[in-house]
Image (cartoon, rainbow, N blue to C red):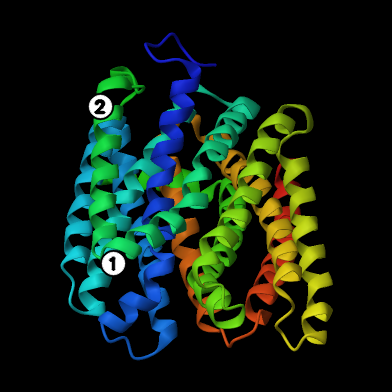
Amino acid sequence: MLEKSKISYGEFVLIVAFLMSLTALSIDTMLPALSVIGEDLHVKHPNDAQLIISTVFLGIAVGMVLYGPLSDSYGRKPALYLGLSFFIVGCLISLMATSLFGMLVGRFLQGFGAASPRVVNMALVRDRFEGRSLAQVMSFSMTLFIFIPAVAPLLGQGILSYFEWRAIFAVFIIFAVFILLWFGFRMEETLAFEKRRAFHIGVILEGAKETLTNRIVFGYTLVLSLILGAFIGYLSSVEQVFHDIYHAGDRFPLYFAMMALSLGFASFLNGKLVLRYGTRNLGKKAMKLMIFLSFLFLPIGYIYDGTPSLWLSMIYFMATFFSVGMLFGNLNAMAMEPLGHIAGIGAAIIGSVSTLLSVPIGVFIGQMYNGTLYPLVLGFLFVGIFSFILMGFVEKFRV
């Protein structure tokens, strides 16, 4: 449980939520601007603008390998400061970009920097909690964090109403500085000096080997990568779906917020239920729900030639993201559970591997966008089936 601290339990959860939200803000705020940026940077194929989203995840995957060991060696706070610095530099590069390549370089650095709070917040929670309490804190944090992606597209659209798209990156910089100051002044270092590990390649490889050779950890990491891959595919193509198929226009942020809040409600409910029912039980039920919904929606899509009515699609997506919201917190907690003694590098390897594997899955699903919902629905269906099968194999190792 939480040790005596100058901050309350509530403020601790809130800080973790804001750390989590940096990645969401840097992705979801961009969604209304993708087509505008694509035109301004002379992107040849509309689907190529999706790379502005997926490149951030690639940067996250690479960055996690660095920040985990750094946080285990020098503490959680220095690792966060370094990451936020990279994030701010990446925002400046994107703000001044005149080509898609320049934009992607900046976005990669934003992801590389955003990897730091993503790793550090998992290690912060693991430093102070374990077991179902760990999953509860992660779920409550995600419940608060989810309000950021719920309003982020509205923020992006609001900025576009008064300024050009480059102003979005200025907002990112302001948000990053705010987090840096709040975390720096209020959060004390959670990694005791005697628990720190020397920063050299041998220790890093040893921690990576222990993480990747643990069948339970690696198995849940693969499951997490599949779920995350389908989610990246959705994020990459959702702006095109709602503008091309449903002509949502200024209503797009509202529809996106409804789906994001569905995911957030699931995370909140998971935080209430996980102590009673357990992470694995809830995880399996959520996965079954995702498979059932996608399997049911396929014939509905066929009836409407791949473009069902807006509200049928909204019901499907909201219910699917409810299951995804139940999965994220539980899968992370199950993967981290055996790694309390190497929480920093363990979080880094889990996050890096799951994200690195998820990016090509997400890019594939996104690039398959063809003016219908088939790519997204089939993506969630097959990811759910493979994840459920893989989770069954992982459970055998626990016996």
Q: Is residue 341 above or below residue 193?
A: below
Q: Is residue 130 above or below residue 261?
A: above
Q: Residues within 10 Å of mark 2 (few under 14, many from 20)?
A: some
* Residue 122 shows in the view: no
User: Marks 1/2: CA distance?
Assistant: 30 Å
The residue wearing badge 1 is 165
Quadrant hosting residue 74? top left
What secondary structure is found at the residue carrying circle 2?
Answer: helix
Q: Nearer the viewer, residue 133 or 19?
A: 19
Q: Which mark is residue 273?
A: none
The residue wearing badge 2 is 184
Quadrant hosting residue 369? bottom right
What secondary structure is found at the residue carrying circle 1?
Answer: loop
* Residue 339 shows in the view: yes
Q: Seen from this angle, which residue lies furthest top? A: 4
* Front of the two marks 1 and 2: 1
Q: Nearer the viewer, residue 352 or 115?
A: 115
Does residue 124 appear to the left or right of 165 in the view shown?
right
- Please give the name of the residue rendered at 32% of the width and 44% of the height, measured from the top-left corner: 116
- Please give the name of the residue rendered at 31% of the width and 83% of the height, measured from the top-left corner: 39
Q: Position of residue 351 (x, y in %)?
A: 45, 50
Q: Position of residue 203 (x, y in %)?
A: 31, 40
